[in-house]
Amino acid sequence: MSKKRAAQAEERAACRQAVLLRDRVCRGRGATRVQCAVTPSEVHELGRGSYRSSCWLDPELCIALCRPCHQWVTEHPTEAQVLGLALAGWQVEQRLNEARQ
């Protein structure tokens, strides 16, 4: 873990807790083609690639997923985007701009 990420660990833990409390059921349930575990155990950043760092600490840009659904979303980014389980870069920018206003 980089020094920058280590310094943000407490903030990330708070973000993760907020997302898991908000999303008490896996957000991939019924959307992915895997055996959903229903209970979320992981937090997925909606943005990909360079936008992931913008999502890392923002609960509004994260969703809670179970492990099987998280793996599916990671392996099928285009389909996940269609299902609303991932965002294109312009969508992340749009949400960030809306939050700033």
Image (cartoon, rainbow, N blue to C red):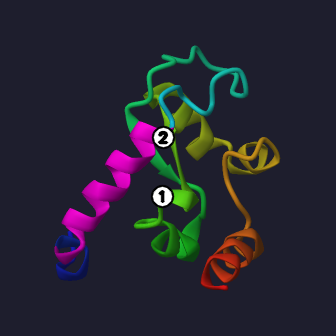
Q: Secondary structure at mark 1?
A: helix
Please determine whether, in this image, residue 56 is positioned above or below residue 44: below
Spot occupied by residue 74 in the image (x, y as percentages of width and height): 57, 45
C-alpha gap between disc 1 and disc 2: 9 Å
Q: Which residue is mark 2?
A: 22
Mark 2: few/some/many CA within 10 Å (<14, 14-19, 20+): few
Q: Identify the residue shown where x is 27% and y is 66%.
A: 11
Spot occupied by residue 31 in the image (x, y as percentages of width and height): 73, 27
In which quadrant is the N terminus drawn? bottom left
Main secondary structure of the magenta stretch: helix
Residue type pointed to by label 2: Arg
Spot occupied by residue 62 in the image (x, y as percentages of width and height): 52, 54
User: Which residue occupies the foreground of this view, 45 or 49?
Assistant: 45
Q: Identify the residue shown where x is 47% and y is 65%.
A: 58
Please determine whether, in this image, residue 63 is positioned above or below residue 24: below
Mark 1: few/some/many CA within 10 Å (<14, 14-19, 20+): many
In which quadrant is the C terminus drawn? bottom right
Image quadrant where residue 27 sits: top right
Residue type pointed to by label 1: Pro
Image quadrant where residue 97 sits: bottom right
Q: Secondary structure at mark 2?
A: helix
Image quadrant where residue 13 sits: bottom left
Q: Which residue is mark 1?
A: 59
Range covered by the magenta-colored residues: 7-22
- Mark 1 in CB contact with mark 2 (< 8 angstroms): yes
Q: Is residue 13 magenta?
A: yes
User: Which residue occupies the foreground of this view, 12 or 1?
Assistant: 12
